[in-house]
Amino acid sequence: MYQFNVNTAIDDCCRWVQDWFAANGDGCPAVLGISGGKDSSVCAALLCKALGVHRVVGVMMPRGVQPDIDDSLLLCRHLGIRSVTVNIGSAADALEAAVAEALPLSTQAKVNLPPRLRMATVYAVSQSLNGRVANTCNLSEDWVGYSTRWGDSVGDFAPLAKFTVTEVKQIGRALGLPAQLVDKAPSDGLCGKTDEDNLGFTYAELDAYIREGVLPSPEHKALIDRKHQMNLFKLEMMPAFPYQPE
C-alpha cells in the first residue's frame, strides 16, 4: 500500500526549490498569488521554509470585494511574508466589456478571464522585483485539467505539481498552517461552486485512483478518465510544426 512520508516530502521539496533558485535566480524572491485556499497557503509555507520569509512575496488580487479576503490576510500574517494587494476589478470589468462589444462572450470565457488577468498581475509584480513566479497547482487538479490555460496553470516553477490534494493537506498540517486554510472547501472563487461540485467527483476518490489504483464508481471513473485525456494538452508546451529545411 502506498505510504506518504510527509516530512521526507517536505525536506525533498525544499531542497528542490533551493536548487532551482540556485540555478535560475540566486537570491531572487519567490512571488505567488495568495487566494486564501490550501494550495497557495501550503506553497507559500514551503517557500518560506526553503528560502526564508524575507524571500517570499504574496500577491492578493480581489475582483472588487473578495468575501474570503480575511483568509488571505491570515496566511500572510501567519507566515510573516511581504504582501501586496492589486484589485483587478476595474481591469476585468473593462476587458470583459471590450470583448463583449466585439462578440458574445461565453460563460466559460468570463470565468477564465480573471485567472488570466491575475497571472499577468503576478508576473508584473514579480518582474518588478526581479522575482520568480511559483505555480500553485497540485497533481489532482492537473490530472483532470482543473485550471485555466495561461492563468493559474503556469508559472516559473511548481513545488506542488506532483502532490495530490490529500498530500498537500498533509503538508499544510505538518507545516503548522491554520486548519481553516488547510481544510477549507476548495473553490475557484469564480462561479460560486466548490471544486468537487464542478468536477462531479471528490478529491478523495480521485487521489485514491491516482495513487493506489482504487477504482471509483464506473460513472466517476469514466468521467475522470475523459477529463484526464481531454486536458493533457494543458501540461505540455505549445506544439510547434517540425519544419525541416530541404
Image: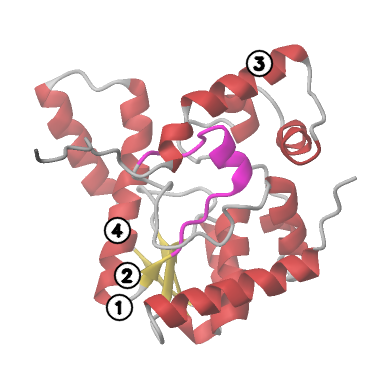
Mark 3 vs mark 2, CA separation in Å:
40 Å
Dot 2: element:
helix
Q: CA distance from mark 4 to mark 3?
A: 37 Å
Magenta residues, start to end: 134-149
Residue 7 location, x and y as percent? Answer: 79, 70
Judging by the rendered image, the residue that carries numbered circle 3 is 222
Left or right for 41, reference 84: right
Per the image, label 3 sits on a secondary structure element best described as: helix
Q: Nearer the viewer, mark 2 or mark 4?
A: 2
Are dots 2 and 1 in contact, CB under 8 Å?
yes
Closer to viewer: mark 4 or mark 3? 3
Q: Please say whether residue 141 is one of the residues in the magenta stretch.
A: yes
Task: Please report whichever mark, 4 or 3, sits nearer to the chain's N-terminal start.
Answer: 4
Marking on residue 126: 2
For badge 1, the amino acid type reads Leu
Expressed as whole percent of the image width and height from the top left, the position of residue 194 reads 60, 34
Instruction: Find the distance from the CA under tag 2 to the CA under tag 4.
Output: 8 Å
Kindly identify which residue carries mark 4.
121
**Disc with the residue nearer the chain's start (2 vs 4):** 4
Residue drawn where x is 56% and y is 62% of the image:
159
Mark 1 or mark 3, which has the lower sequence index?
1
Foreground pick, 209 / 23:
23
Vertical placement of residue 86 versus 109, above or below: below
